[in-house]
Amino acid sequence: MAITIVNSQPSVAILVDALQNLPINPPSLYLDLEGINLSRNGLISIMQIFVQPTDQVYLLDILILGENAFSTSGQSGTDLRAILQSANIPKVFFDVRNDADALFAHFGVFMAGVIDLQLMEVAARGYSKRYLAGLGKCIEQDVQLKGEAMKQWKATKEKGLSLFAPERGGSYEIFNTRPIQEDIIAYCAQDVVYLPLLWDVYSKNINGAWAAKVKEETRARFEMSKDASYDPNSEDKALSPWPPLSFGERP
C-alpha cells in the first residue's frame, strides 16, 4: 500500500484523474474525513481516499487546499466535487453522517452514490439491531485480523488516539499540524484500508429487502445533513434506525 499526501492543485489534478474509470462492483473508492469537531460546527482537516484496485491511499489536505480540493479539475475536466456528487460512482464510508454534514456546510458538497458500511453492518447482523457499532469493533469482530496484523492494527490505532483523543491526553488540533505527523498519516490510512474487507463481509450477508433499507436510510442520513436541526453530537446517534422488534427480531 502506497500513501500520497495531496496538498497542491497540481497534485489534486493528478488525484482526480486517478479516480476516473474505476470498477464499480465491488466499489473502488473508500473514504473518511478527519478534523476538529468534524461537522458544520467544526472544520475538515484531511480527507482519506483509498483506491482499492491500485492499493493507493490519498490523504487530501483540506486544511491547506480549502475549496481548491473540490474545484480543481484533472485532464478529464472533472473535479472532486463532481465525483463526490455522482450517483454513478459508488463511494464507501463508515458512518457518513458528520462527514456529509461537514462537506455540505463548508463546501456545498451534497454527496450521492454513497454506501454506508455502518448501516450495512446492522443489516447483516444476526442479533439485536438496537445499537450501531463503531468502526473499531467492526474491524475486530468481522475482519478477524490474526497475529502480527492485529498487533499492528491496534498499535497504529492507539498511537493515533494518544495524539488526538482528549481522554487520552491528546488534542484534535493535531490534525491541523503541518507537516502531518507520521503516526497521524498511518492512523488516517488505516481507517480506510480495511473498509473493502468489511464491505465484502457485509454484502454477502444482506438480502434484497435489507439492501433497499440500507439505501433508503443512507439517503435519510444525507437529508439530515441539510437540516438546520441536525445535532452532530446527539446521544441518539448511537441507536440503529431499525427498532429491535422490526421484522420479527427479538430485542
Image: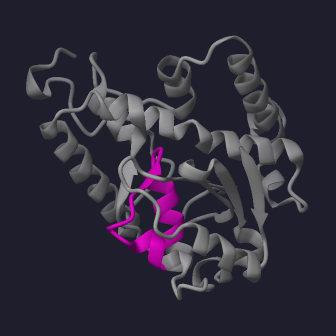
- Where residue 208 sits, quadrant-wise, is top left
Span of residues in magenta? 82-104
Q: Which of the two residues, 25 or 160, is positioned nearer the viewer here? A: 25
- Residue at the spot 51% in from the left edge and 48% down from the top edge: 233
Please determine whether, in this image, residue 246 is positioned above or below residue 251: below
- Residue at the spot 44% in from the left edge and 29% down from the top edge: 133
Residue at the extreme top of the image, as rendered = 147
Q: Is residue 73 visible?
A: yes
- Residue at the spot 61% in from the left edge and 52% down from the top edge: 54
Q: Is residue 228 visible?
A: no
Say which quadrant the N terminus sits in.
top right
Q: Is residue 58 magenta?
A: no
Q: Is residue 96 magenta?
A: yes
Q: Which of the two residues, 62 or 198, is positioned nearer the viewer here? A: 198
Left or right of 243, for residue 6: right
Say which quadrant the C terminus sits in.
top left
Figure label count: 0
Q: Which of the two residues, 201 or 132, is positioned nearer the viewer here? A: 201
- Residue at the spot 74% in from the left edge and 39% down from the top edge: 165
Please determine whether, in this image, residue 71 is positioned above or below residue 47: below
Q: Residue 11 in the image: x percent, y percent?
A: 74, 75
Q: Residue 77 in the image: x percent, y percent?
A: 53, 88
Colour scheme used in the picture?
Answer: one colour
Please determine whether, in this image, residue 225 is positioned above or below residue 9: above
